[in-house]
Amino acid sequence: MTIQRHWSLGAKLLMVGAPFLLLIFMATIATLWVSWQLDGGAAAVNEAGRMRMQSYRMSLSIGTRETSQLPDQSAEFDRSLATLRQGDPDRPLFVPWDTDTDQRFAVIESDWTAYQARWILANPTSYDELRADTVAFASHIDDFVNSIEVHIAQWTALLHLLQMSMLASVMVGASVLLYTGYLFVLEPVGQLKQAIEKIQKGNFDARVERVSSDELGTLADGFNGMAEHLQSMYKNLEAKVAEKTLLLKEKSDRLESLYEVTALVAKATSLDALAQDFTKSLAKISHADGVALRWSNQGGQRHLMLAAHGLPADMIDGEQCIYTGDCFCGSVTPDSDLRIIPIRDESSAPMQHCLKAGFETVMTLPVRLHEHLMGEVDLFYHARISPTPAERSLLEALSSHLASGMENLRLNALEKEAAVSQERHLLARELHDSIAQSL
């Protein structure tokens, strides 16, 4: 079973920077060690230089016969030899010993023993060779110093090499860290910033590609989840706004339709004008391909077409007066509601005008007032339709307005007829009175 390791951002940066930090740390230690060697070698060169000066001072004391200071000078030279041989870590001071340096130091010790025995411990009678012995002794000290300086030159070259390697390591490490920082941090943050700007501009499809399993990858997953949630909420909000807008439009259209029919009913002066205008308005409101308005007799057996709109002429002529059962139309009852009849599924009807005209659906709507059936409205469609509850309610309200208008026209006609009858009665009475007076 393979276990997938998820590295954090800090671990990745540490893995990239650790080798360079280790390299710089080792180079720093090496530089400090070389510097320490240089300090010790330089101190050894200074101490050897003191020995050369001490040899000249002792030669001067011997040559001038002022030998009172020779014991102290000799002891000081012995201390210098011991310091060079043993080293002094407190200063620091130490000789970079190798075969050549060790041999040259042995020559100095041998020369010092001979020089000390001949010129310091003994009582010389002749001083002619003092200068030559001192110069030879000092030259051997110079050779020892030169052997140390060879090592110092090597350490100096090594120090320069370490410094250059540290500089190169710092530059390479900084470049690598900058690149990895851009790759691991700046680029994902930049992509996240661009996605946020898209979200701010309303583009909720913006997503951030997850390219790592670290904290920025987790942040990308969180951002994508938030964007999906916002997109879902926005879509739901759009759907709700569209739904509310459609509902408001339906209500506005319904009010406009009711106002139109109400105004039509109010200004109608005759049943024929009311029927014609109503069928035209209803065809526009219901988007029907054809409309027929029928008046029913008292028993509801005979149905007379008062007005039609959008129907073929032969259909209008053939259905001017129909009886219940002759067609899909004329089948409403006082207690019936709006009916939807698929014409092709009802091919057994005696009259086939609807089928011949190419209609697929007929909708029959009763026109009644106070449970009294006055007629029906037939809506014809070339396609299969299924009205919504709001559309059903609107059609029923329009039929109710029509019934009220028809009733108002009937009442107005009755009032006019009663007025005419009363006027005729008064004229007849006046004529009778006039005839009676003349007789």
Image (cartoon, rainbow, N blue to C red):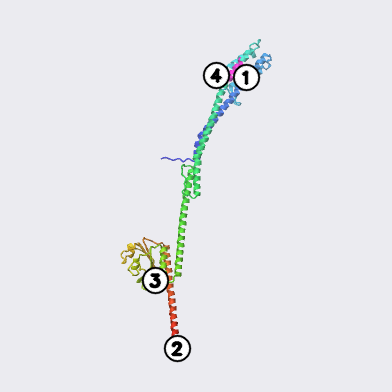
Q: Taking 354 as reference, is 67 left or right? A: right
Q: Which comes before the other along the chain, label 3 or label 2? A: 3
Residue 389 rendering spot, x and y as whole percentages: 42, 63
For the residues labelled 1 and 3, the Cα–Cα distance comes to 145 Å
Report which residue position mark 2 lands on: 438
Q: Amino acid at mark 4?
A: Asp
For the residues labelled 4 and 1, the Cα–Cα distance comes to 19 Å
Instruction: Give the residues drawn in magenta, as a range.
Output: 136-146
Of the two numbered discs 1 and 3 in the rendering, the one whose residue sits closer to the viewer: 3
Q: Which quadrant would residue 100 be assigned to in this image?
A: top right
For the residues labelled 1 and 2, the Cα–Cα distance comes to 187 Å
Give the total number of marks visible in the rendering: 4
Using the image, tell me which numbered label, if any, was put on residue 374: 3
Q: Amino acid at mark 3?
A: Met
State whether residue 150 appears in this view. Answer: yes
Residue 85 rendering spot, x and y as whole percentages: 58, 21
Q: Taking 65 as reference, is 263 left or right? A: left
Whether residues under marks 4 and 1 lie with C-beta atoms below 8 angstroms apart, the answer is no
- Which quarter of the image is occupied by the N terminus? top left
For the residues labelled 4 and 3, the Cα–Cα distance comes to 139 Å
Q: Which comes before the other along the chain, label 1 or label 2? A: 1
Q: Secondary structure at mark 3?
A: strand
Q: Which comes before the other along the chain, label 1 or label 3? A: 1
Whether residues under marks 1 and 3 lie with C-beta atoms below 8 angstroms apart, the answer is no
Report which residue position mark 1 lands on: 51
Report which residue position mark 4 lands on: 100
Residue that protrudes farthest toward the front in the picture: 438
Q: Which comes before the other along the chain, label 4 or label 2? A: 4
Q: Which comes before the other along the chain, label 4 or label 3? A: 4
Q: Secondary structure at mark 1?
A: helix
